[in-house]
Amino acid sequence: MKAKRPLEGLKVADFSWFGAGPICANHLATYGATVVRIESETHIDALRTVAPFAKGKTGYNVSGYFNNFNAAKLSITLNLNTEQGRELAMKIVAWADVFLTNITPRVIERWGLTYNKLVEVNPKIIAAYQPMQGYEGPHRDFLGFGAVLTPITGYNYLSGFPNRPPFGLGTNYPDYVINPGHTLIAILAALHYRNKTGKGQRIECAQLPSSVAPLGPAIFDYTANGRVAMRSGNGLPYAVPHNAFKCRPLSNSGLPVDQRWIAIACFSEEEWRALAAAMGSPEWAADGRFSTLEARKASEAELEAKISEWTADKDAYELMRDLQSRGAAAGVVQSAREILDVDEHMKERGYYVYLDHPETGRAAYDGPPFKLSKTPGELCAPAPLLGEHTEYVCKKLLGLGDEKIAELLVAGALQ
């Protein structure tokens, strides 16, 4: 018999957009929750317009970016700028166990979706808000995305190479990992509390402090030692070498040529000796400049140049296997194509899930981020078309009749 997913029966009203909110709701859907994604034709979630797109396809339903983060959700198109639309939103809140949004506080207040309004229709609701910088403070109404968070939180200052401008992390770290992960944990904690007490609660997972949290080591180094951490490229103060080195390019495969790199890291003398042995124990490796970690660190640029000469004509995968067999930490810097199509470990674990979408066809989705032995997660449906489930949500979940649905369509509340 097929195992139940752990969140089956949980009802989620996903009023979020872009990344941090939808990704959190995506995890809830993966583990069994029924997630209704509230969208608008007049204000499209811009993630639906962002590449990559299915080859030869256009429109709001073919973004791989959007689809990957919205699998198995039900999409309803609702105009919250109309009175009837806001009334219908409250019916969805009354149906739900969890309300989730990352829309700015100013707009949430204008639409009447604040916690004190939600509990009037659903006293047990768990309402999770993800404002950019919080509901209090001088910056409460500031807008932004991951690319804004990384500079104001200090990540950009730490990202890049010495004596060069900050490089940054793009949107990936705060938007796809920290903020949705923290919010997911908070929702699960609130569900645990409600199961024990019968009471819901308001969650505020402001994206600024959520993103700042993992900077603890840099903050501690400053408070304890007075040191301001600086950009160090791929380097670490306690490992050398610790970098990526160019190998022989992949060619003659019938595919675009991939530049190949291997990451090598030595944290101990044993790992350094293993690397030196793999290089054939060259005379220079026994030089006093490389005899200790401190000495190697002082001569890091010269050391990396010699390793680069050695790796330049090597096959990255063969070299990785040789180094790993000797006890030296090494890994091929894989491209997206290699992760999806080549990596034997990922294939055997079955991480990527292929789903059939009505417009994009068969495509790969990120699989469940963690596995539960008794109640595993599952991607049971592709991302929804824009407004695909409007009628289903209105009729089956909210109990509205055809006449009422027609009235809402005429009023522009449903789109």
Image (cartoon, rainbow, N blue to C red):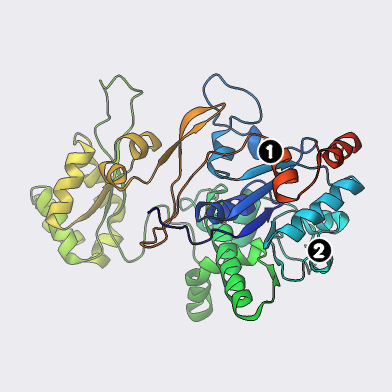
Position above or below: 331 against 8: above
In the shown orientation, is residue 239 left or right of residue 42? left
Quarter-wise, where is residue 74 in the image?
A: top right
Task: State which mark lies toward you, 1 or 2.
Answer: 2
Going by the numbered disc 1, the residue's amino acid type is Ala
> In front: 391, or 27?
391
Residue lying at 39% horizontally and 61% vertically, measured from the top left: 372
Query: Residue 402: percent from the left, percent from the top?
Result: 81, 38
Position above or below: 308 against 7: above
Residue lying at 67% horizontally and 63% vertically, measured from the top left: 97
Residue lying at 65% horizontally and 33% vertically, measured from the top left: 49
SS of the residue under disc 1: helix
Quarter-wise, where is residue 41 in the image?
A: top right
> In front: 219, or 107?
107
Position above or below: 393 against 132: above
Residue 240 can be seen, yes or no: yes
Position above or below: 50 against 113: above
Q: Where's the C terminus, which quadrant?
A: top right
SS of the residue under disc 2: loop
For mark 2, what is the residue?
114
Query: Residue 118: percent from the left, percent from the top?
Result: 80, 64
Counting other residues with Cα less than 10 Å from the Cα at mark 2, is it few (<14), some (14-19), or many (20 or more)?
some
> In front: 51, or 188?
188
Query: Residue 224: percent from the left, percent from the top?
Result: 49, 81
For mark 1, what is the residue?
46
Going by the numbered disc 2, the residue's amino acid type is Thr
Residue lying at 80% horizontally and 52% vertically, measured from the top left: 89
Q: Where's the N terminus, which quadrant?
A: bottom left
Query: Whole-Å distance between the Cαs marked 1 and 2?
Result: 24 Å
